[in-house]
C-alpha cells in the first residue's frame, strides 16, 4: 500500500450496529490494532468494533482528513447507505484486504 495518501474506514460490531469512523495511512495495521484491542480502553474496544465494513482511499493525507471529518458529521442513515453501497451484507472486509495485499489471513 502506498504511503502518500490514506484511508477513511468504518468499523462496526454487527449489521446496523455501532459505527466508528477513522482514518489511517496503514489500513491493514490499523485494523489489526482494532481487532486485537491494542488500545484497551478505546471506543472501538469498548464496543467490540472489529468488523471493517467500509473503506475508501484518498490520494493525499489532507483529503483523507477532510473526508473523515465530513463523514463524522453525516447522519447515521448516510453512513449506512455508504456501507451498503460497497458492502451490502456488512461482511468483514479485512481478510479480503489481507489477501489482496499478499498476506495470509489468520496468520500473525
Image: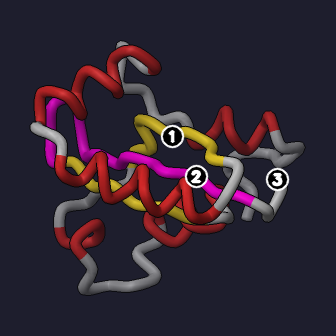
From the viewer's perspective, is residue 59 above or below residue 4? above
Residue 7 bears which disc, if any? Answer: 2
**106 relative to 43 in the view: left or right:** right
Q: CA distance from mark 1 to mark 2?
A: 6 Å
Determine crowd level at label 1: few under 14, some 14-19, many 20+ residues with C-alpha closer than 10 A: some
Residue 39, percent across and down?
Answer: 39, 85
Magenta stretch contains residue 8 = yes
Q: Do residues under tags 1 and 2 come within 8 Å of each other at their CB atoms?
A: yes
Mark 1 or 3, nearer chain start: 3
Determine crowd level at label 3: few under 14, some 14-19, many 20+ residues with C-alpha closer than 10 A: few
Secondary structure found at label 2: strand
The stretch in magenta equals 5-18
Residue 78, percent across and down?
Answer: 19, 28
Residue at 41% x, 36% y is: 53
Magenta stretch contains residue 89 = no
Secondary structure found at label 3: loop
On the image, numbered disc 3 is attached to which residue? 1
Q: Do residues under tags 3 and 2 come within 8 Å of each other at their CB atoms?
A: no
From the viewer's perspective, is residue 67 above or below residue 79? below
Residue 55 bears which disc, if any? Answer: 1
From the viewer's perspective, is residue 36 above or below residue 15? below
In which image quadrant can residue 99 be found?
A: top right
Mark 3 or 2, nearer chain start: 3
Amino acid at each position: 500500500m502506498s504511503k502518500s495518501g490514506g484511508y477513511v474506514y468504518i468499523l462496526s460490531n454487527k449489521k446496523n450496529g455501532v459505527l466508528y469512523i477513522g482514518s489511517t495511512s496503514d489500513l491493514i495495521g490499523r485494523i489489526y490494532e482494532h481487532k486485537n484491542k491494542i488500545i484497551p480502553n478505546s471506543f472501538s474496544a469498548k464496543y467490540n468494533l472489529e468488523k471493517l465494513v467500509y473503506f475508501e482511499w484518498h490520494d493525499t493525507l489532507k483529503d483523507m482528513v477532510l473526508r473523515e471529518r465530513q463523514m463524522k458529521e453525516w447522519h447515521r442513515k448516510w453512513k449506512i447507505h455508504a456501507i451498503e453501497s460497497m458492502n451490502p451484507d456488512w461482511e468483514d472486509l479485512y481478510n479480503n484486504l489481507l489477501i489482496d495485499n499478499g498476506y495470509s489471513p489468520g496468520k500473525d
